[in-house]
Amino acid sequence: MDSLAALDRLVDTLDLDQPWPGEAAEGQRGRAGSARVVALPDRWLDSRELDAEQAASVAQAELSVSGG
């Protein structure tokens, strides 16, 4: 959306008489199984400071074109 007005126009097109989807919209969302194991990068908890290599790696990961 490039503006709130554009969002308002889109919302105005919604059919407000649409029934609630019922069972399809009920139930658990997100992870339904066991807790996920957290995996931190090597030596992540050793320091609160990033060295130049780590900072560059984080900067690269934050680019919108990096794929994550």
Image (cartoon, grey):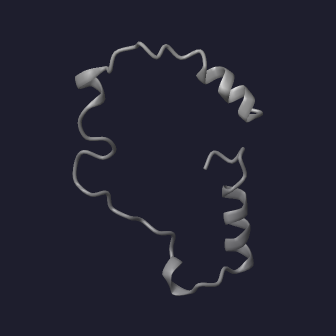
When asked about the image quadrant of residue 13, the answer is top right
Residue 1 relative to residue 48: left or right: right
Give the image location of residue 17, x and y in percent: 41, 13
| Picture quadrant where residue 4 is located | top right
Q: In front here: 9 or 65?
A: 9
- In the picture, measured across the screen, residue 22 lies left or right of residue 53, that is left
Residue at 71%, 72% in the rendered image: 55
42 relative position to 48: left or right: left
Residue drawn at x 68%, y 65% as measured from the top left: 57
Q: What residue is drawn where x is 38% and y is 64%?
A: 38
Count of numbered labels shown in the rendering: 0
Q: Quadrant of the N terminus?
A: top right
Relative vertical location of residue 28 with respect to residue 5 in this rendering, above or below: below
**What residue do we see at 70% from left, 80% from top?**
51
Nearer-the-camera pick, 64 or 3 = 3
State the image coordinates of residue 23 (x, y, percent, origin top left). 22, 24
Q: Residue reaching furthest bottom?
A: 47
Q: Residue furthest right?
A: 2
Report x, y in % for residue 66.
69, 48
Q: Nearer the viewer, residue 11 or 1?
A: 11
Decide: is 58 above or below 44: above
Up-down: is 13 above or below 35?
Answer: above
Horizontal side of 25 relative to 17 (left or right) equals left
- Give above or below for 23 relative to 33: above
